[in-house]
Amino acid sequence: MAAIAMVVVAAVALSSATYAWFVSNNKVTAQTTNIKAQSNAAFMSIEYGATAVGSTTVAETDWTGEIALYPAEVQKGDADAPKFVTAYGTAVNDGTKKGDYIEVGDAAKAVTDSYAVGAANNFNISSAGIDLSNLVIDKVEVTTGSDKALASAVRVLVVGSNSWQVWGADGKKLEKTTDAPLVTTITKDADTPISVYVYYDGNNSEIYTTNLNALANPVGVTISFSATQPDTIS
């Protein structure tokens, strides 16, 4: 069995079948603080907003400070690229989706229009001295303060050169997104960019207009990545 190299990204980001969408133009305000990264392997490193080649494998930065987001959902768009959509709720105290989805656009448009936080190629992953293959997400962990409801609405979109995935607050990948590796090859001594976005899923029973004040606690998101290293290292 080939050995596994693992990188953990800790992003303190955003403070059932029921569909829940805001019925007004109010936004949920959530505190954001730091993004941290560390590697548990000798070969793989990660940095936020900087080269990971030769890095110490630990990065920390203020991502957004504080941001207010509208609820959204990610679906497959043109050429199977991730597309953000939103919708209206039934009443201020009833988030049941009413009417059709409204298209927001790609991830960049979602960030511009306050449906998500993140940026294209905001993380770099690098390998020291050897090529690695098949970058995957092992798990996603969401932690929160006293408001557990907010955590259940957090979603993480990760986009690589080969595929993209959406993960939920329960630490599981959403069924409709691919099992394919995010990146097939991490070239040695070079940066491999990935894009990470965080948003609130409108398909959550807690996300409705009159519940906005309850959804203000910070939430921590930890993404664990791994890649396969070769059987032999020259």
Image (cartoon, grey):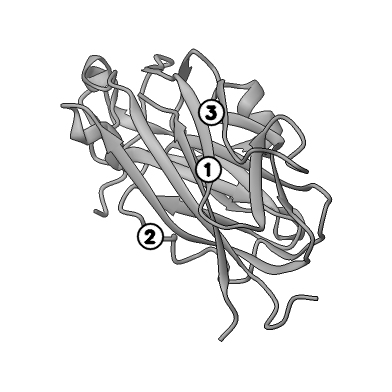
Question: Which residue carries the number 3 mark?
Answer: 115
Name the residue type under label 3.
Tyr
- Lower position in the chain sequence, tag 3 or tag 1: 1
Provide the secondary structure element on which disc 3 rests: loop
- Mark 1 crowdedness (10 Å alpha carbons): few <14, some 14-19, many ≥20: many
Closer to the camera: disc 2 or disc 1?
1
- Lower position in the chain sequence, tag 3 or tag 2: 3
Provide the secondary structure element on which disc 2 rests: loop
Picture coordinates of residue 41 (x, y %)? 56, 57
- Report whether 155 appears left or right of 53: left
- Report whether 67 appears left or right of 187: left
- In depth, the one of 210 and 91 nearer the eye is 210
- Report whether 168 appears left or right of 146: right
The structure residue drawn at horizontal position 54% and vertical position 39%, both measured from the top left corner, is 37
- From this viewpoint, which residue is outermost toward the bottom? 1
> From mark 2 to mark 1, how far is it between C-alphas?
21 Å
Closer to the camera: disc 3 or disc 1?
1
Task: Report whether residue 33 is seen.
Answer: yes
- In depth, the one of 228 and 194 nearer the eye is 228
- Report whether 71 appears left or right of 84: left
- The circle drawn on residue 38 is 1
Name the residue type under label 2.
Lys
